[in-house]
Every structure is written in structure tokens, then in C-alpha cells.
Amino acid sequence: MIPEITTFNDYIKQWDEASRDPAGYFEKIARSFTWKKNWEKTLEFDLKEGHIAWFKGGFLNITENCLDRHLAERGGQPALIWEPNDPREKNCVLTYRQLWSQVCRMASGLKKLGVKKGDRVCIYLPMIPEAAVAMLACARLGAVHSVVFAGFSPTALADRIRDADCSVLITADGFSRGDKSVPLKRLADEALQVCPSVRHVVVVSRSQPYAIQSAREVGWTDLLERGEETFPAEPMEAEDPFFILYTSGSTGKPKGVLHTCGGYMVWAGFTLRNVFQTRPGEIFFCTADVGWVTGHTYGLYGPLLNGLTTVFFEGVPTWPHPGRLWEIVEKYGAQVLYTAPTAIRALEMLGSEIPDRYAMPSLRVLGSVGEPINTDAWLWYHRHVGKERCPIVDTWWQTETGGILISTLAGVTPSVPAWATLPLPGVQPVLLDEEGREVPNEAAHTQGYLCLKSPWPGMMRSVFGSHQRFVDTYLRRFPGYYFTGDGALRNAQGHYRIIGRVDDVVNVSGHRIGTGEVEDALNMHDLVTESAVVGMPHPVKGEALHAFVLCPPSQDVSQGLKKELQDLVAQKIGRFAVPEKIFIVPGLPKTRSGKIMRRILRKILAGERDLGDTTSLLDPAVVETIRQTVWANQ
Ligand code: PRX
């Protein structure tokens, strides 16, 4: 079993030990996993160069840890319970043995298609059991999966397939979320027109029986049937690439965050066990989609590494009724519910009587992830969902960190509304000032740029295809530190509270969106000269996008343009990235050096009269015209 931290003193002791001797500490943790060959060196790193290696020389396969090693004891236990979008449809339960068997067959089927270790496979699927099988099958044969959230548009999918040079795409004919249906295969086909690297397309029949349309297509079930019954897990070196997951940053092009095999496995297993204090056999309900990192680490790999049952939910919290999440908790007797503040706020607005109708006695721990959780939402979650019995873990982490870095350990360390609280063992956060000096921990509250001073096993290793981009984005701003892009507060007890992004990244309903990406999409319109997108607080979504768009003065700008721009963003990125408001303005607030002062745009949107220092503006008069436009269109 993965080692556990059981008391507050134990936590302090282990955190100290891991800080003094990270290699020694994680050696002990890593030994609780199954390795095919022991590692030669536990840790090697140079943070300035972006060289990080954990468990070098060790060989493993994560699927043996997720599946094979549980077969003897819990082969008949559910590994995955799938709850469909429509509750009238039959659910599906896969035991550890059944999941293992499907993974073997699919790995073997993919191998027969020519997929080998190191090849990239793109997975563009809704939340169905096949998504889990596809990911694990790739892992079993050593192929690198790149899961693309099924809400992304064909253009975004094509960009990701091309960047990772994927040779196979696994997708589905279509699916529904709530009352909306998505013709997924049609979207995939559109993307594939510009993706010559894709040699095979595996299609799951989700909505209806799917008829193969071309020589490169193969049906999911056919491929499973073609696969052998057993499939030996490929030995993976600890630092071999494991998966790529694209995420947004401050520049337009999304980055392929690269994780490796050994460190990610250890971090996923260790953090889940300790943050949620789980016992094998428990039911773990993480509402995140596998298209995001939370779905990878705590929807799939973490629960299976710990011998839990993971609940895969295809639908949305409010359809066909607003008690859907609570109903699922009740139906399956989940011990852990892990969701996002945006969902909590949306459900809170629908009324406390809804969760109050469900007893949910099985619940033991509640989790929050993806954005800061405000005190109100925290208290509501505590009272109406946890019935004041369940500790809340506010877990701070990122796609790049592989797993949770700062969080309460349920029932072990303190849980404080709106505070992520304390770092896990092996995590050494620091707050830096503008000049990169560590802010000392003397004052009652200190604030700064949240950075990590040493590597932890789950840390990303590179940006796929551009190691320099990894170094430039995360390691250059403060040499010797990993820069998270977040600002944080720390109190005298050493607890952290995450304030939010300090770069051009906005968290909309827990979806991380680079404003640069949206601007790039808007700028593609013939009538748009330039645009600036900013994030503003939103009562449910956390933040919402607002776009300021500049068109040539001679143009007769019609209302239709806003709609065209919205469609353009939906087409280039996805519906979830469409700005809430679009303002067509005659100028943007720019410095003499041409930089857009987004701070001013945010202040105008907030209705603030005092815009701070505007002396560096090239044309101060532009501020007034933007203000008029905003007022006229609010
Ligand atoms: O700003 C932080 C916010 O989400 C960002 C990471 O987004 P992503 O890579 O999409 O991963 C989301 C799921 C881990 C962070 O830089 N964030 C994440 N968790 C929290 C949070 N902000 C405040 N509190 C959290 N618990």
C-alpha cells in the first residue's frame, strides 16, 4: 500500500524529511509501487536548464500498478463505474479484471495497427469507459497519449494532432451532454483533412451503430476483438514520455505539457492517497473530464493506483435535474466527491433544498480544484453537501505539476475556507517579489509570485517539441525556481491562499484559457485589426472573458460582426472560450512601446473612475471612448 500520513505531527515530520532529503524520502514512497527493475539514481536535477530526472534507470509500466497488481485481491471489485449522460440509459460497471482484459485487448489491437512505444495517439472522446481503456491501452504498450477535450473545435484538435505528430486518432461517432448532442466524428473528420500524419482512426459507436467510412477507419469493437487476450506490459524507463496534455499559456499557441512514466505514477498515487485519505475499495467520484489533467490524475490513474472505484460521469450537474451530482453520490455510495468551485457556485444558486434532499451518508471527504474557492461557496459545500461532517480539501495544482502540490490532507491537517493551506511533502513553495527575492515569512500575511524551489516527482519534464519553451515559460523568469504563474498569500502559520493568475491566463468555469489564444482567433476576422481580451470576476464561472476589438475606422460595423466573432472563437478553439461580451472600440489603450495596458481595460469594465497611472499611454483620450462604448453596451 502507498504510505500514508496519519497525523499532523507525522505530516510535519515527513515534510521536513522530504525537504532535507527528497531522494531518500521518495525512494521509500516509490518502493511501494511495482517496478520491473529498480532505479539507479533517485533524483538528478538542474532547474535552470530544465533537467529533471526521478528514478533514473528504473523500469515500470503504470498499467501493472493500476491493474495487474490488484487482480489477485480485487479482480472482482469495480474499477470503473460509468454513469451515462441520460439516467434512463443503462450504466456500466467494469471490474478490475474486466478493465484489465479490455486494456490488454485494445493494447494488442493498437499494436496490430502498427502503434509502438513512443508513438503518439490522440484521444478525442467523451467521458465513456472507452476513454479510460484507450488511455490505459496506450500506457500498456508505451504509446504516448494526447487526450483532447471533446469540447475543442476541429481547428484546435488539428493543431494538437499536428503538434504531437499523432499517427492514430481514437474518437466516437457522437455523444450528448445534457440536452445537447455533439457530432464528434464529423468534427474529427474536419480536423483530419489537415492531419496527414494520422494513419488510423478508431471509432467508438456511442450514439448509434457506426458504419466504417474509409480504409483507415476501424471500429472500436472490431479492434478489441482482433486483440489478444493477454498483452505483456511494455517496460518503460522512468523518464520515458508518458503523456502529453495541451494547456494554455500567455502566448497564442497551446503547449504540449510532457509528463514521464515513473515520477507521474508515484505522484498521482501518493497525493491521492494522502490528500483524500482513501482506503482501497472506496468509491471516488471526480467530476472532471478526462480531457483535463484532473481527469487524468484523479479521474483515472490515481484511483486505480490506489485500488479504488472511480466514477466516470458523462453528463452535466444540472441535467435532467439539478440534483444529479448528489443523486450519483447517493446511488453509488461515494466516499469522495471532487469537483470545481464553478459547479459548486452554480448548484448553490439553484437552492440549498436540492442537496438537502439527499442524505449522502457515505461521503467522507469533499474536494475542490481548478480555481480559488470563495468562502461562501466553501461554507455552502461544507454545510449542504458535507452536512458539516466532511473535511474539505482545497487542492491547488496545475497541468504542469501532474498532481496536487498544496492542499489540506483530509482530517489530518487544518481545513480553512478559501485557503489551499499547506504543501505536500516534497513541495517547497516560496513567494518571490518582483526582483526574484524570497519574501520572508515574518509578517502576518505575505504576498508574492508563487514558485517552487525544488522538483517533485510529478513535475512536467518538457514542452513537447520545444524544450526551450519549457525553460523560457517556467524557469527563466526566476532562475533556479519553477514559476507557477499564480500569485499567492501566506499567513504566519505557513498556509497558502492562491489569489489567481498573474499572467495572461484566465480560468473560466475551471477551463484554463490563454487570452492570447482568443485574441489570435478574433484577429483572424478580416475586419479586425487588433484585439485585447481580459478576464473579469464572474459570480458563477469564477472569471469571464471580455473582448475589445479594434476595426478600421472606415468600416461600417454591424451587430452581425459580434456574432461572427463569437462563431470564429467557437470554431478556432471551442464554445467554452467564447467571450461573454465583445466591445467594438475605435482604439486600444497602448503604451508608447505598443503594449496594450489590460489593467486599464479591467478597471473600465469594473466601472472604476480612477485608472491609476496613465501617463505612459500613447493616446490618453482613447480611454474615454472605450468607457463610452462599455457603458453603452453593458
Ligand atoms: O490558477 C491556478 C488554478 O488553475 C491553474 C491551473 O489550471 P490547469 O492547469 O487547467 O489545472 C487545473 C486543475 C489542476 C492554476 O495555475 N487553480 C487550480 N487549483 C486551484 C487554483 N486556484 C486556486 N485554488 C485552487 N485550488
Image (tube, rainbow, N blue to C red):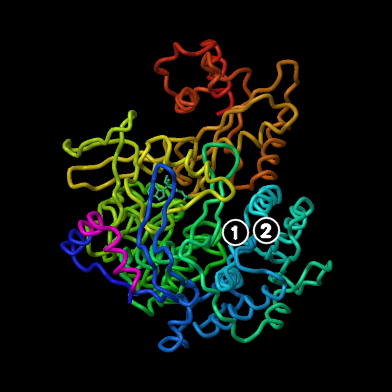
Magenta highlight range: 15-31
Mark 1 C-beta closer than 8 Å to ligand 1:
no
Compared to residue 67, the image places residue 447 above or below, namely above
Relative to the observer, which residue lies in front, 344 or 208? 208
Residue 198 drawn at (x, y percent): 74, 59
* Label of residue 146 in the image: 1
Name the dominant secondary structure of the magenta segment.
helix
Amino acid at pointer 1 = Ser
Residue appearing at x 42%, y 18% in the figure: 611
In the image, taking residue 607 as reference, residue 628 lies left or right, namely: right
Relative to the observer, which residue lies in front, 161 or 618? 161
Residue appearing at x 52%, y 54% in the figure: 258
Crowd around label 2: few <14 · some 14–19 · many ≥20 (10 Å): many
Mark 2 and mark 1 residues within 8 Å of each other at the beta carbon? yes
Residue 355 drawn at (x, y percent): 40, 64
Tell me the residue that label 2 is attached to: 166
The answer to if 267 sits in the magenta stretch is no
Give the mark toward the camera: 2 or 1: 2
Crowd around label 1: few <14 · some 14–19 · many ≥20 (10 Å): many
Residue appearing at x 31%, y 36% in the figure: 432
